[in-house]
Image (cartoon, rainbow, N blue to C red):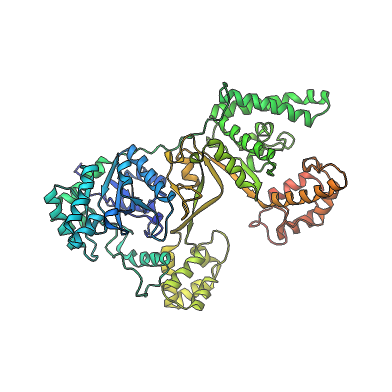
């Protein structure tokens, strides 16, 4: 097999959010089609796409190189920010890169985005390889200004702290000052014995993606395309060039090509994926498994005493409960999840002890007798024939996942408690990504292209507002769309551009309920993303990626229904207290209460969880449920997308 000739070491995916058009999968696929042995994705101050990139790379036979681009503050240049690309050479470098990124967000940031201090590189230098940032790096800026003294100071810093790990980056994409910088950088490299490396500063897959990329950037920056004040920082040449194209482009500096391959060989990071790591739950001198067995059996005794006050009946029914509990405990301990149950048990008990309303249990977790015994759920799974195997099955190894509902107003108190218990640096919420959706992308593209509001509004209103709607689905659902697309050239141009941008990552947010608890610091598993004030940290991996990276997700769902019920109970109990009556215990209301079913049959279900939609109210009127089992059937069978408004 012949020696590789070039590797792309500076590439942005759409996870950069400020720029970058392609997703990680297509980038890897393109690199593989070009015969490249490796690829670096270096998104702007984040590793959001790392897990997907790492998996796709190995799947395609491409070595994934982990890196990121940064804005750097160098005290020698005053307030001016410069660019730097940081690659992880090994696992220590990967850890230090994660810390650099997290630190940049945790300090807070402004319009320029997260910034690192050059001095941070000294503390976190081990295992890192640096590319100078080309004409936008500190050395590049000083070279273009002819400030030799500052050039010497900057170079001395990198020579001292990154010997053989600092490369002068050479870029030829037809942008202003690139060639002037390049010739000065080559002279400097020869004079100081510094290595050079070629990149194409890639932002999109093909050269004809340039216009779409310009619109993507203009959407982010808030400009129209024809605005004379709009920054023009990119060129049509920043596509993923082939090996032959890059070799031709840098034929006069072959060592810049050779060094891309050498750097790729030196970068060897192993990301542990597909394992699970839980914090150690305090169990005294007992093992976690034995402690779970002990707490479950104690809890079951309490539950049986409540369910069957008559001792004879309890004795008669006990064997089926004991047998089910033993089977579940065996599966839970075999699969390695006793800690998960104990952690959930603790924060639910804390919530109940501290006046935070908690739901009785929802989803497949309600099928677990262990969960019922530990008071995680309040539903007896044997009474309702619920299956434990739907929740946890040895033949389908996946993390258990309790959907735990909390009062919307007090949910954050529970998360605060968990952070206090396990350590604030070990607890984080999870990132979500907003993408350019069908209706919004038409509006955004139309605005950037300078079309009149009415013209754009007319087109976007033809896209149905249904969840998960795409332009392709809209063309099938709305006959007018293909008609105006064929008839009007401006409409066609707008929609064609919108298609290129649809699904591109636009911004980051916070998952509604997901919280991860790490056995050590979160940054041992994933970098952090924070708001502009450096607060409210979330993992940079989304909910599926963060679990694949080893962290276990706990769902802390804020449910407004519980908040409303809590308000109602407070009002009722104030009145009862005045009347000298004991407080109302909502758990003591029987499931066959006739007055409740009378209200239900009248469809008086506004604000009742899962029973308040118009279609569900119509169905209730028709079926007249008169027992709890009827309600179970209603909720299980009714699906808005399957039933029309007549409830059929």
Choose between 470 and 20: the one closer to the eye: 20
Which residue appears at 37% of the width and 57% of the height? 22
Q: In which quarter of the image is residue 288?
A: top right
The answer to whether one can see residue 554 in this image is: yes
- The N terminus - image quarter: top left
Q: How many marks?
A: 0
Which residue appears at 57% of the width and 37% of the height? 400
Name the side, left or right, on which 311 lies relative to 107: right
Q: Where residue 420 appears, x then y in whole percent?
A: 56, 38
Say above or below: 90 vs 621. Answer: above
Q: Where residue 424 appears, x then y in whole percent?
A: 51, 41
Name the side, left or right, on which 397 lies relative to 219: right
| Residue placed furthest toward the left | 191
| Residue placed furthest toward the right | 579
Choose between 526 and 530: the one closer to the eye: 530
Q: Where residue 404 appears, x then y in whole percent?
A: 63, 43
Q: Where residue 361 appears, x then y in whole percent?
A: 67, 41
Which residue appears at 41% of the width and 58% of the height? 17
Q: Quadrant of residue 183?
A: bottom left
- The C terminus - image quarter: bottom right
């Amino acid at each position: 097999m012949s020696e590789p000739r070039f590797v792309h070491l500076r590439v942005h995916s759409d996870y950069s959010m400020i720029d970058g058009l392609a997703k990680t999968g297509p980038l890897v696929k393109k690199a593989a089609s070009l015969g490249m042995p490796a690829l670096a994705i270096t998104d702007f101050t984040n590793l959001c796409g790392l897990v997907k990139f790492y998996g796709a790379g190995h799947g395609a036979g491409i070595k994934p190189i982990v890196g990121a681009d940064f804005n750097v503050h160098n005290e020698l240049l005053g307030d001016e920010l410069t660019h730097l690309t940081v690659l992880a050479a090994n696992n220590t470098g990967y850890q230090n890169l994660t810390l650099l990124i997290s630190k940049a967000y945790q300090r807070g940031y402004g319009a320029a985005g997260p910034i690192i201090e050059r001095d941070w590189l000294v503390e976190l230098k081990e295992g890192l390889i640096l590319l100078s940032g080309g004409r936008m790096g500190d050395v590049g800026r000083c070279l273009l200004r002819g400030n030799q003294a500052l050039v010497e100071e900057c170079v001395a810093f990198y020579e001292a702290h990154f010997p053989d790990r600092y490369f002068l980056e050479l870029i030829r994409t037809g942008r202003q000052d690139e060639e002037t910088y390049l010739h000065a950088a080559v002279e400097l490299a020869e004079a100081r014995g510094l290595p050079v490396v070629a990149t194409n500063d890639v932002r999109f897959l093909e050269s004809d993606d340039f216009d779409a990329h310009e619109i993507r950037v203009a959407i982010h920056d808030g400009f129209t395309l024809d605005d004379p004040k709009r920054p023009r920082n990119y060129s049509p040449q920043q596509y993923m060039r082939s090996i032959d194209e890059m070799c031709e482009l840098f034929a006069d500096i072959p060592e810049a090509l050779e060094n891309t391959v050498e750097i790729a060989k030196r970068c060897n990071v192993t990301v542990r994926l597909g394992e699970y790591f839980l914090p150690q739950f305090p169990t005294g001198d007992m093992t976690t498994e034995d402690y779970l067995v002990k707490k479950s059996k104690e809890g079951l005794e309490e539950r049986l005493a409540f369910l069957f006050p008559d001792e004879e009946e309890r004795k008669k029914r006990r064997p089926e409960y004991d047998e089910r509990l033993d089977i579940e405990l065996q599966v839970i301990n075999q699969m390695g999840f006793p800690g998960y149950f104990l952690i959930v048990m603790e924060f639910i008990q804390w919530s109940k002890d501290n006046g935070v309303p908690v739901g009785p249990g929802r989803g497949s977790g309600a099928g677990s007798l262990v969960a019922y015994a530990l008071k995680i759920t309040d539903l007896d799974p044997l009474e309702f024939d619920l299956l434990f195997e739907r929740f946890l099955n040895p033949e389908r190894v996946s993390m258990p996942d309790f959907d735990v509902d909390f009062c919307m107003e007090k949910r954050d108190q529970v998360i605060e408690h968990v952070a206090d218990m396990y350590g604030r640096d070990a607890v984080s919420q999870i990132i979500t990504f907003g993408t350019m959706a069908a209706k919004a992308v038409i509006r955004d593209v139309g605005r950037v292209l300078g079309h009149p509001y009415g013209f754009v509004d007319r087109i976007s209103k033809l896209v149905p507002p249904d969840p998960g709607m795409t332009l392709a689905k809209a063309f099938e659902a709305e006959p007018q769309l293909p008609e105006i697309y064929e008839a009007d050239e401006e409409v066609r141009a707008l929609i064609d551009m919108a298609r290129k941008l649809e699904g591109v990552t636009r911004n980051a947010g916070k998952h509604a309920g997901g919280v991860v608890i790490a056995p050590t610091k979160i940054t041992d598993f994933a970098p952090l993303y924070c708001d502009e004030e450096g607060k409210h940290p979330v993992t940079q991996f989304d909910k599926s990626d963060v679990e694949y990276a080893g962290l276990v997700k706990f769902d802390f769902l804020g449910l407004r229904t519980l908040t409303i019920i809590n308000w109602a109970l407070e009002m009722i109990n104030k009145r009862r207290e005045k009347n000298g009556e004991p407080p109302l215990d909502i758990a003591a209301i029987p499931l066959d209460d006739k007055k409740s079913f009378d209200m239900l049959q009248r469809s008086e279900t506004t604000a009742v969880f899962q029973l308040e939609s118009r279609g569900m109210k119509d169905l209730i009127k028709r079926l007249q449920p008169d027992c709890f089992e009827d309600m179970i059937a209603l909720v299980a069978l009714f699906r808005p997308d399957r039933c029309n408004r007549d409830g059929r």
